[in-house]
Image: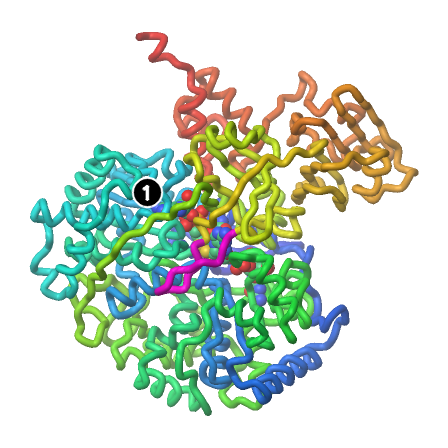
Amino acid sequence: MQEIRSTCPYCGVGCGVLLRPTADGVEVRGDPDHPANMGRLCSKGSALGETVGPAGRLATPMIGDQAVAWDQALDLVATRFADTIAQHGPESVALYVSGQLLTEDYYVANKLMKGFIGSANIDTNSRLCMASAVAGHRRAFGTDTVPGLYEDFEKADLVVLVGSNMAWCHPVLFQRLEAARASRGTRVVVIDPRRTPTAEGADLHLPIAPGADAALFNLALVEAERRGLLDRAYLAQVDGLEATLEAARATDPAMTGLTQGQLQQFYDLFLGTEKVITAWSMGINQSDSGSDKVNAILNLHLALGRIGKPGMGPFSLTGQPNAMGGREVGGLANMLAAHLNIEDAGHRDAVQGFWASPTMAGKPGLKAVDLFRAVEAGRVKALWIMCTNPVVSMPEADRVARAIQSCDFVVVSDMMAETDTMRLADVRLPATGWGEKDGTVTNSERRISRQRPFRKPADLARADWWQLAQVARRMGFQGFNWETPAEVFAEHAALSGVAGALGSDFDISDHAAITRAEYDALQPFLWPANARKQGGRFFADGRFHHKDGRARMIAVTPRVTAAPMILNTGRVRDHWHTMSRTGLAPRLNQHMAEPFLEVNPADATRLGLQADGLARVSGMGASALLRVTITDRVAPGQPFAPIHWTGETTSAGRVGAVVEGSFDPVSGQPALKSGAVSVEAAKPLWFGYAVSARGLSPNCAYWARAIHAKGMTAELAGFDEPEDWQAHARALFSLSDEVSVQMVTDTARGRVRLAFLAEGRLVAALFIDRSPVALSRAHVASLLGEETSGALSGRPGADRPDPGPVVCACFSVGMNTIVEAIATGACLTVADLGAALKAGTNCGACRPELAALITRHRPQLQEAAE
Ligand SMILES: Nc1nc2c(c(=O)[nH]1)N[C@H]1C(S)=C(S)[C@@H](COP(=O)(O)OP(=O)(O)OC[C@H]3O[C@@H](n4cnc5c(=O)[nH]c(N)nc54)[C@H](O)[C@@H]3O)O[C@H]1N2
Ligand SMILES: Nc1nc2c(c(=O)[nH]1)N[C@H]1C(S)=C(S)[C@@H](COP(=O)(O)OP(=O)(O)OC[C@H]3O[C@@H](n4cnc5c(=O)[nH]c(N)nc54)[C@H](O)[C@@H]3O)O[C@H]1N2
Ligand code: SF4
Ligand SMILES: [Mo]
């Protein structure tokens, strides 16, 4: 059977995949012909096949707890939205959507809301992600344009990564960069307060003070002028140089938290290299001065004329697979379709004319934080959330949950039956997921690729665009009669032609008459795609999209984040957001199976935090309980926690609950990387580790559970000690008294170990200790379902080596195995480890960690020789 070409549903790199359906799922490999990845995939992309099973899917539409037919659900949604609008006006309803929708879904959502309901109260999780980049681009260029291409990372001599943990978050693009480093010596600077895996391997790591990025780029601009490096010819097309320089000159270098030596090194590298890419991500965007940070970066590139030319330019790394597509259809509350401006009456008229719509939103709508505050205040009375989990991902997440709960009518469309947001819905609609969906996405370099289905939708799941169009039709709106996503795409492409004529950069009118067959055969292509311009870069010619054709430099007065304890939040290598999909893949749960807090040793000492103990992080009237990792990767006062854990996977690991909702005044993007928090030691009476061949229903103050290839594992802790551990364990594992138990107790040390066996095979085990449980977790979990009487030792016997926690997820290579190979001198390079153990040879995402292990554990030959 022929493989089906599709696109990975995770990050904005937008890798092409080849799919071969199997009896119970799909085999996935990288598409060698896709220009984004040329065959490579990261750990998440490689494990896609493990995430497409039926587990957890919502099978049918639900009204409350009642399964209903689609007609009944859609009628109810249409009636309630229409009634609410009739009584309270169009501003009383809202859509909250997602950069993981396909462009076709997104187009329909935006058309319905802005053109037919007549309100711009449609916002998206891209507000939490890309809004500052959008605002910065629009201020500088007049449109939301990414000037460069991925190949520029391979053509540059210097790549500056600011607020980006690219090794973990855009792994395949990072691999392309690593290959360029190996072949042509590209240098890499990482600007991040935290020493990330990306920073570990960089030529220069600048641990900047949180929030101070604009100060650094201002200072570099002043230095560029001092060295006489400004590109005066290019600047003839740019306004605002003098005011920008004046603001920049007022910048105090001390703000950056960097030494004079570090600053000099940065100036020398940046200013002394012509071909420089500055790529940024959430460390820039998710800030209360995010737009200014973006413009400080763009200012420097404009002033040096280093933009839109091979190997040079500013580059916004987009997070979600279709963050760009969402921007192209105008999915944000302050945008209009096809990169047009909602505040421009001429643009609004053109779109309204094209849609032949009865009304048109006349002003920007509510941005995410304000949108949920309007829900809280009762001003928004009907809300439809689609393809996002705001109860986890919004700042002040508990407050958002209460707002949703108090809303008169809430619809949620998701693939999964149970998410923290789904639980609060009045109507739950089952959406088709990756592998069933059919449409297009746009990656970070403006490349539009098809996502193609390899199988029929699960149960009654339906495409998001179809759900929206059905509701629109039931509300009596004309213009929602598409039969296929190809027709939606053609309409979107035709509208972009109208926009192009008005000066928009986004014009793919070449595809305005695309047929179904052409759509099905569509090859990945770069936009723009029209009679005037095909793909390529923007702005080398100094022509921009402001009405006067000129660019703007923006005067920036930098800010720093000041609070005694700033919670930095972000991602881990193998999980995707709220884990509704990556959490299903046992392979991806091995790398990090529990939420954690990285704290500097000085903080740990001051706060009495114990390694592997628990910390309580409090803010916004909420708190999270997290495992303590003591490390100098983070600076004092700047603890870091991952964002992935939810009410489904933990008792209290939702860090969004403690992050405040302050936001950038220009973009409305929340400052998700800098919530002021307090941290204290939580002192449980006991810690536990549990494995079960079936489910696990923890009933204690702290728990975090993960799916394992052989069942489920959980970390536990409690502040009260159960009277009867065996009864507690049986309830935890839902095991009757019939299942036999082995138990050892060491009362003096507070240790209890229980193993449950059925027909001699291990069905569950629980290990309790007064201090954090120390045992070989990988070994214990691997015994599930096996005939064993030795589970209680918690360690493999001498005949079975303990591989330790997994570092390479693709080949399940454990830390102990790797360290041993290094310490014996057998492997002294990442390539050696690959040759000996296969570690790091598939997706390469663990290569920075392998390099760090080599640095730490290699035999100290040189020292001995000296
Ligand atoms: N594995 C994985 N990959 C993903 C995702 C995922 O969930 N998992 N999600 C995707 C999405 S939607 C997104 S948006 C991207 C995000 O990709 P990234 O932005 O690379 O990831 P984050 O971990 O959110 O944050 C990046 C870094 O910003 C740093 N930072 C915090 N404050 C500051 C600051 O003031 N200045 C600077 N310079 N840096 C700061 C943090 O220490 C962190 O290391 O990843 C995408 N890729
Ligand atoms: N503190 C803190 N908070 C953050 C961030 C941070 O760095 N720090 N990062 C922010 C960023 S950049 C982002 S992008 C957000 C991400 O946050 P969310 O968007 O809330 O996270 P996801 O888990 O990706 O949610 C997607 C949901 O859609 C479902 N789904 C998947 N495919 C489909 C589909 O085709 N249709 C429908 N209807 N549903 C589908 C999934 O099951 C899942 O429930 O988090 C933000 N929140
Ligand atoms: S880098 Fe990984 S997560 Fe991102 S698109 Fe490629 S395979 Fe998917
Ligand atoms: Mo994102």
Above or below residue 467? Residue 674 is above
What x and y, as percent, mark residue 626?
59, 40
Callout 1 amino acid: Ile
Above or below residue 407? Residue 724 is above
Q: Residue at x 60, y 47 (%)?
A: 623
User: Which element carries disc 1, helix, strand or loop?
Assistant: strand
**Which image quarter is the C terminus in?**
top left
What x and y, as percent, mark residue 53?
65, 55
Magenta span: 659-671
What x and y, as percent, mark residue 828?
40, 22
Local crowd size for mark 1, using a 10 Å CA cut-off: few (<14), some (14–19), many (≥20)? many
* Res 524 quadrant in image: bottom left
Q: How many marks?
A: 1
* Res 776 quadrant in image: top right
**Which image quarter is the N terminus in?**
bottom right
Looking at the picture, tell me which residue is in the foreground, 756 or 227: 227
Q: In the rendered structure, does residue 641 fall within the stretch colored magenta?
A: no
Asked if ligand 1 lies within 8 A of label 1, the reply is yes
Looking at the picture, tell me which residue is in the foreground, 203 or 70: 203
Q: Which residue is mark 1?
A: 191
Q: Is residue 835 left or right of residue 24?
A: left
